[in-house]
Image (spheres, grey):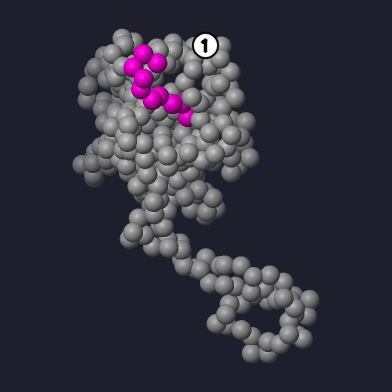
Amino acid sequence: MHKLFTIARWFVGLLFIFSGLVKANDPLGLSYKMQEFFEVWHMGFLDSYTFSLSVIIITFEIVAGVALLIGWQFRLFSWLVLLLIIFFTFLTGYAVFSGNIKECGCFGDCIPLSAAQSFTKDLVLLVITAWLFIKRKSIQSAISRFKAVSLIILATIASLYIQYYAVEYLPPVDCLPYKKGVDIYEQMKIPSNAIPDSTVITFVYQKDGKEVEFDTEHFPVDFSDSAYSFVRRYDKLIRKGNAEPPIKDFVIMTPEGVDTTAAILNDPREMWVIFIRQVDNKSKAWINSIQKINGWSIDNQRPVIVVTPQFEAVTDLFQQSNIQLPVYKGDLVAIKTAARSNPTLYQLQQGVVLDKRGRANMLQPFGFTE
C-alpha cells in the first residue's frame, strides 16, 4: 500500500509540473481562456486581472508538483492541491455540461484536449488527490528543510522566468498556427480532408396552438395546409464536423476598410509586419524600437507595416512619436493569437513566416542592439 501511495504521489506531482510547464510556455493563452469563462459568466470586469491570475495559477501548479514529489509540508500542500483540482474539475465540468466552452486549455495549445477529455482527466486526478489528502499525515519529507525550501524557491523562480520569457520573447515552444515556416494564406483554407457539419432542414409549424417540429423525412401523416400553419425553418445540426481552417479571422484592412489581406500575403517581397495588440502604459517600453525600425525602413527602402485592432490609438501614438509606418486594421482575436508578445514582429515572404520576434528582441533582425 505504501508503494502504491508513493506512485500516486509521484504521478500527481509530475502531472502538475508537466501541466504547469506547458501553461508557462504560453501564460497569455491561459489568460485568454480565463477571459472566455468570465465572458460566459458575464464577469468581464475581471478581464484585466486574468494575466496576473494566470501567472499565479501556473506558478503554484509547478511549485505544488515539486512539493508533492519531495513530500515537503505535505499536510499544507495536500490541502492546496485538492482545492486546485476541485477548481479545475469545476471548470472542465462546466465546459462539458454547459457546452459554452469547447476547450479548457489544461495543456495549452501544445496538447489540445476537448472539454470531455479534460473533465475525465480531472475526475481521475480528483479521486487520486482525495486519497492522498486522506493519507496526508503519513508523509514525511526525506530531505532536509534547507534543501526542500531551496527546491521550492528554484521552482518558483524557474516558473516565473519561463513565463517572463514567453511574454517578452514569445513562447519557447511555438504551438500556435502562426509558427515559423507556416504559410498563413494556406492555413486560412479549410483542409481538403475536413469533415463538414451534418445538418438537416427542419420545419416548425403550428397546430392547435402548439409548435410542431419535423424534418423533410418525417412529415406528420395528417399534414395539410389547413391544419398546420408555417412558422419558420432552420438547419438543425446533427453532427459537428471539423471543417474549419487552422487560422480564422485573419484580415488586414486599409484605414478605409478595404481588405488587403491577399495582396500583402501574396507580395513576393520580403515583408516585415508588426502586430500591435494594444496601446497601454507599457507602450513607452517599445515605442523607441518602432522608431528605429521606421528609420531602417526609410533608409533601406524596405516594406514594414503595422497591423492592429486599435487603429486610432496606434496612429495617435505614431503621430506623437514621428513614426511614418503605414498602419492597417486587424481582427483582435486573430492578433491575440498571432502576437503573444506586444508588439510582435513577423518576417513574411508570400505569406510564409520566415521569422518572428517578441518585443524584447525585435530589433535584432535590423542590426540594432536592444
In reply to whether residue 72 is colored magenta, the answer given is: no
Can residue 5 be seen here? The reply is no
Q: What x and y, as percent, mark residue 24? A: 35, 29
Location of residue 66 with respect to 282 vertically, above or below: below
Residue 34 falls left or right of residue 177: right
Location of residue 137 with respect to 220 vertically, above or below: above
Q: Nearer the viewer, residue 77 or 202?
A: 202
Magenta residues, as a range?
Answer: 298-307
Label 1, secondary structure: give it: loop
What residue occupies the far front of the structure in this picture?
301
In reply to whether residue 299 is colored magenta, the answer given is: yes
Q: What x and y, as percent, mark residue 175? A: 32, 38
Q: Nearer the viewer, residue 126 or 328?
A: 328
Q: What x and y, as percent, mark residue 174? A: 31, 34
Q: Nearer the viewer, residue 314 or 137?
A: 314
Quarter of the image containing the C terminus? Answer: top left
Q: Amino acid at mark 1?
A: Ser
Quarter of the image containing the N terminus? Answer: top left
Can residue 350 be seen here? The reply is yes
Measuring 54% from the left and 39% from the top, which residue is drawn there? 258
Measuring 61% from the left and 67% from the top, which residue is drawn there? 234
**Residue identifier under label 1:** 321
